[in-house]
Amino acid sequence: MAAETDDMSSSLAGSTRPKEPRSFLSEATSLLAHDLNNQLALLLANVEFLDEFFGGQADLDADVRETLSISQAALQHMMTLVRNMSDIARMEDPGLRPAPTATDLTRMVRSVAREHRSLHDRGALKMVVDCPDGLRAEVDPTLVRRVAHNLVANGRRFVERDGTVRVTAALEPAQDGQDLVLTVANTGPAIPEERHATLFDKYRLNPDGRVARGMGLYFCRLACEAHGGSIVLSHDADFPTLFTARFACGPRGGSMDEELL
């Protein structure tokens, strides 16, 4: 499986106002994240090669097989964290906007699910995808794909070995067009009620009093709001954790809210 190497700079349209010089720390973070991502992609490619080369051997030791699987999952997770670190810095610029493009959402959603299924104990995870054939809409494909990746990865980390992650995608009518509604649910433990209010914040206070920095879910919030949408947490009878991400399709998406800065 080839490592994902998308670049947010090619996804976001030009600023609507003159850009101010970015701080040294922001620039250094982006450069460091770029270099780390390249090295992680190289490591992941090598681990995937070893998995393909040795994985088909019937007599391969079970511990070796499990080590290869765990290594791939860990590297994918690290790459996601590094990308989030870099992309959040870019997306917090309120002058940046998404670049809507006609996108094959069916292919995207199924691709994300397939990649995560292959990383979880060779199919032990049950991945349910509910997305109609031929689903297309004008959204920023890089942002939407990254939101899907973050939410599926989040669910995959917390489900049991034989648990389920369900991904759905559909278009819903909106007041001035259509919205893409992406849901990702999992059978892992429910998120405590006291965490809901700050779940999508950049910073939150842990029960032990320490301040934690959000990455994945904060990124998802920024990406949805950049499209003029939103993201919420809920649950249903089958899934204790259910995320619903909404994206306004076409040119309706707004820029980042300056309150996020």
Image: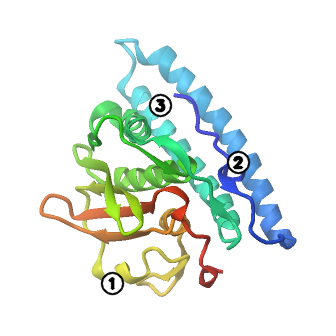
In this rendering, would 46 be left or right of 25? left
Q: Residue tagged by mark 2?
A: 10
Position of the C terminus by quadrant: bottom right
User: For the residues marked 2 and 3, what is the alpha-carbon distance in whole angstroms?
Assistant: 32 Å
Q: Nearer the viewer, mark 2 or mark 1?
A: 2
Give the secondary structure at mark 2: helix
Residue 36 screen position, x and y as percent: 71, 48
- For disc 2, the neighbor class at 10 Å (few under 14, some 14 to 19, many from 20) is few
Q: Residue at x 64, y 40 (%)?
A: 5
In the rendered image, the vertical position of residue 68 relative to residue 198, given as above or below: above
In this rendering, would 135 be left or right of 229? left
Q: Residue at x 53, y 26 (%)?
A: 48
Q: Residue at x 29, y 76 (%)?
A: 192
Name the one closer to the observer, 254 or 44.
254
The numbered mark at residue 194 is 1
User: For the residues marked 3 and 1, what is the alpha-carbon distance in whole angstroms?
Assistant: 37 Å
Give the secondary structure at mark 1: helix
Q: Residue most toward the front?
A: 176
Residue 10 screen position, x and y as percent: 70, 48
N-terminal of the pair, mark 2 or mark 1, is 2
In the rendered image, the vertical position of residue 87 relative to residue 120, given as above or below: below
Q: Nearer the viewer, mark 2 or mark 3?
A: 2
Quadrant hosting residue 129: top left
Residue 17 screen position, x and y as percent: 79, 72
- For disc 3, the neighbor class at 10 Å (few under 14, some 14 to 19, many from 20) is many
Q: Residue tagged by mark 3?
A: 68
Name the one closer to the observer, 19 or 46.
19
Q: Check disc 3 and give the amino acid type.
A: Leu
